[in-house]
Image: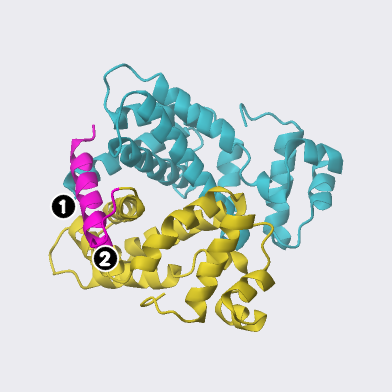
Chain colours: A yellow, B cyan
């Protein structure tokens, strides 16, 4: 998604989430999404292969940011500190619109098994990107595998907290993700 | 799947995996699967809603077994010991046919994005079943969430090892899953 700009792609995402929420995913067509966003069908198809892909917009960018952050973490830090750098890098690119869309997107996913499947595969992709980046730092499996899954959990829990009820206007996503990661780090050491 | 019996359901799974491997998922029809299994199309639809569901046959049974094992673990044991009980319970129900189908099923999933999505959602379902069972034991999030994800990793890694190259005819799945869990448990305490 890069920086969130009010371009056609972003308008299409907002229009799609609105329509999925209003009338359901199954009953929404690409033509309706394009019309609501004020663009043509062919503009839609320049950005997305189908209506389902709208909801995972940004997966590739997110994967790249997570991997970049992990790659650029200081040498010698442990896997979870590298993951923290990845989460911070990704979080810094997500702004108010992401926060506003989060709960509506979640509702649309919850109401459609097709979207749940696509959403699950998105999670698999994000974890895989982190795992690969960790392995490239010389961290071996199963530590890399485990740290990537903990990173994914921190991503989800931090994002949910950011989008949740206690939101203040001025707080960014990164502190929520890093707090979630710290909580999981503590939990990991206490597991028996 | 309950105990693996040579009934229509099992024949349909074998036929589907064979056909997906031979000619690809997209090019395989329900009619072909039914014919290969020696049953009618209506028998197919008594067991599965569509061809995709064949590949996640047993998800509900697996979820139930994992949850039962966790619920029946001795009182007072930690979350990962409860998860170990769940894995052992599920593994005990998986036999030679599961082991033989594993690699072919994996190849079929790898070749189809549609199957990857469904497979990813299956994983989400298994982890959710473990997390719920842990919460019912009084274990709170994020420990329950984390232990369930570690359990899912152990399930996948143990299953892959069992289906892998070093297989001996006489070893069961449970030791592989429990070894994978122990490895992850050690990795979790060493993460920084």
Distance Cα–Cα, label 2 vs label 1: 15 Å
Q: Is residue A177 on the magenta stretch?
A: yes
Residue A111 screen position, x and y as percent: 58, 48
Q: Which residues are magenta?
A: A166-192
Horizontal side, residue B181 vs residue B13: left or right: left
Horizontal side, residue B16 vs residue A123: left or right: right
Residue B97 screen position, x and y as percent: 61, 38
**Mark nearer the viewer, 2 or 1:** 2
The front one of A113 and B169 is: A113
Q: As displayed, is residue B117 above or below residue A42?
A: above
Residue in the picture at 38% in, 25% down: B136
Q: Quadrant of the N terminus of chain B?
A: top right
Query: Can residue B94 be seen in the rendering of this structure?
Result: no
The front one of A22 and B42 is: A22
- Where on the picture, by quarter, is residue B156? top left
Residue in the picture at 26% in, 52% down: A143
Task: Give the prevailing secondary structure in the magenta stretch.
Answer: helix
Residue topped by disc 1: B192
Horizontal side, residue B90 vs residue B190: left or right: right
Residue topped by disc 2: A86
Secondary element type, mark 1: loop
């Amino acid at each position: 998604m890069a920086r969130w700009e009010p371009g056609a792609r972003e308008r299409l995402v907002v229009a799609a989430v609105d329509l999925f929420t209003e009338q359901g995913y199954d009953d929404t067509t690409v033509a309706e999404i394009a019309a609501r966003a004020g663009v043509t069908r062919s503009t839609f198809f320049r950005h997305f292969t189908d209506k389902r892909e709208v909801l995972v917009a940004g997966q590739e960018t997110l994967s790249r940011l997570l991997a970049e952050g992990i790659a650029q973490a200081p040498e010698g830090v442990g896997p979870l500190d590298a993951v923290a750098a990845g989460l911070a890098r990704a979080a810094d690119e997500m702004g108010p619109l992401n926060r506003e869309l989060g709960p509506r997107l979640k509702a649309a996913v919850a109401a459609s098994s097709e979207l749940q499947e696509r959403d699950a595969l998105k999670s698999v992709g994000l974890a895989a990107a982190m795992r690969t980046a960790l392995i490239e730092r010389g961290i071996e499996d199963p530590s890399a595998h485990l740290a990537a899954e903990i990173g994914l959990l921190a991503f989800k829990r931090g994002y949910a907290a950011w989008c949740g009820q206690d939101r203040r206007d001025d707080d960014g996503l990164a502190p929520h993700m890093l707090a979630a990661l710290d909580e999981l780090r503590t939990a990991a050491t206490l597991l028996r």
